[in-house]
Amino acid sequence: DSGVTQTPKHLITATGQRVTLRCSPRSGDLSVYWYQQSLDQGLQFLIQYYNGEERAKGNILERFSAQQFPDLHSELNLSSLELGDSALYFCASSRQGGLETQYFGPGTRLLVL
Amino acid sequence: KNEVEQSPQNLTAQEGEFITINCSYSVGISALHWLQQHPGGGIVSLFMLSSGKKKHGRLIATINIQEKHSSLHITASHPRDSAVYICAVRKTSYDKVIFGPGTSLSVIP
C-alpha cells in the first residue's frame, strides 16, 4: 500500500458525460501527478501540482482539467467524454515535487461506452 | 522516433537467470525512474537515478548520462518478478515526465 488513495476504483459512463476522479496523496506529500494509461498509448503524463499550484503540464486535453485543494487532495475532471478516453488514470504523489520518488495510487479504471 | 526507447519489448527467462532491461533516451534529463507494473495494474517506483548506480535487494539500476542510457538488472530472477518494467525520464522538475513503452518480463519456474 503506497498510501495514495484514488476514488472511484471503477467508473462506467457514456460518451458526452463528465466525471471527476479524486486522489488523496500520502501524508506529508505536497505534490500530486496525474497519468493516463491507455492500451494503445501506454503511460502518459497529464499534469502535476505542487502545494496547490500547477507545476508541470503534459499531454492534457482541453476537455480535461485538474486542481489541487488546500488540504492537498486533487481532482481530475474529464468532460465531453469520448470512447478514446477509456483508460486507467493513475495519481501519484511525492514529497516536494522535485526529482524524487513518486508513490502511485491504485488507479481509476474508466470505461466510456 | 520516440524520445524514450526500451529493449527488449518482451522477455522470457528461466527462474534464476540474470536479466537486463535497457532504456535509451534522446533528450537531456536530470532524472530517470524505473517503475514496475504488476499484472493487476498497480505501479511501484523501483528507482530514481540522476547518476551512477543504485541497488535494492536483487535489483540494480545504472545510468550513463553522457551516453543517455540506463539499465535495470535483476539477479536470481523469480516468477514474482514477472511484470512490465517502465523507464521514465524528466528534464527538470518543471517539465513533463516522458515514459518508455515498457518491457514485459515473464519468469518461468
Image (cartoon, rainbow, N blue to C red):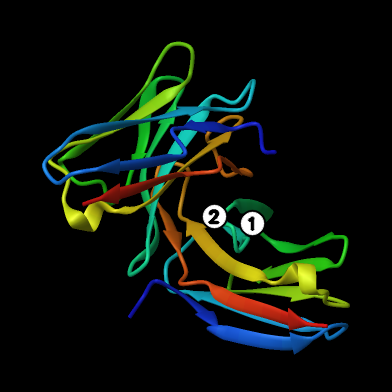
**Which residue is at a point 48% across and 12% down the rendered structure image?**
A71
**B84 left or right of B1 in image:** right
Looking at the rendered structure, the secondary structure element under dot 1 is loop
- Callout 1 touching callout 2 (CB < 8 Å): yes
Residue B106 is situated, as x and y percent measured from the top left of the image, at: 68, 80
Q: Crowdedness of circle 2 by 10 Å Cα count: few (<14), some, many (20+)?
A: some
Looking at the rendered structure, the secondary structure element under dot 2 is loop
Residue A112 is situated, as x and y percent measured from the top left of the image, at: 24, 49
**A31 left or right of A95 in image:** left
Of the numbered discs in the image, which one, if any, rests on residue B30?
2
Q: Crowdedness of circle 1 by 10 Å Cα count: few (<14), some, many (20+)?
A: some
Nearer to us in this view, A20 or A95: A20
**Which residue is at a point 64% across and 68% down the rendered structure image?**
B83
What chain letter is assigned to the residue under label 1? B
Quadrant of the image for the N terminus of chain A?
top right
What chain letter is assigned to the residue under label 2? B
Tell which circle, 1 or 2, labels the residue nearer the N-terminal end.
2
Of the numbered discs in the image, which one, if any, rests on residue B14?
none
Does residue B68 appear anywhere in the picture?
Answer: no
**Which residue is at a point 48% across and 18% down the rendered structure image?**
A72
Residue B61 is situated, as x and y percent measured from the top left of the image, at: 73, 67
Which quadrant of the structure image shows residue B31?
A: bottom right
Read off the residue under disc 1: B50
Does residue B87 appear anywhere in the picture?
Answer: yes
The CA span between labels 1 and 2 is: 6 Å
Toward the top, the furthest residue is: A70
Give the amino acid at mark 1.
Ser
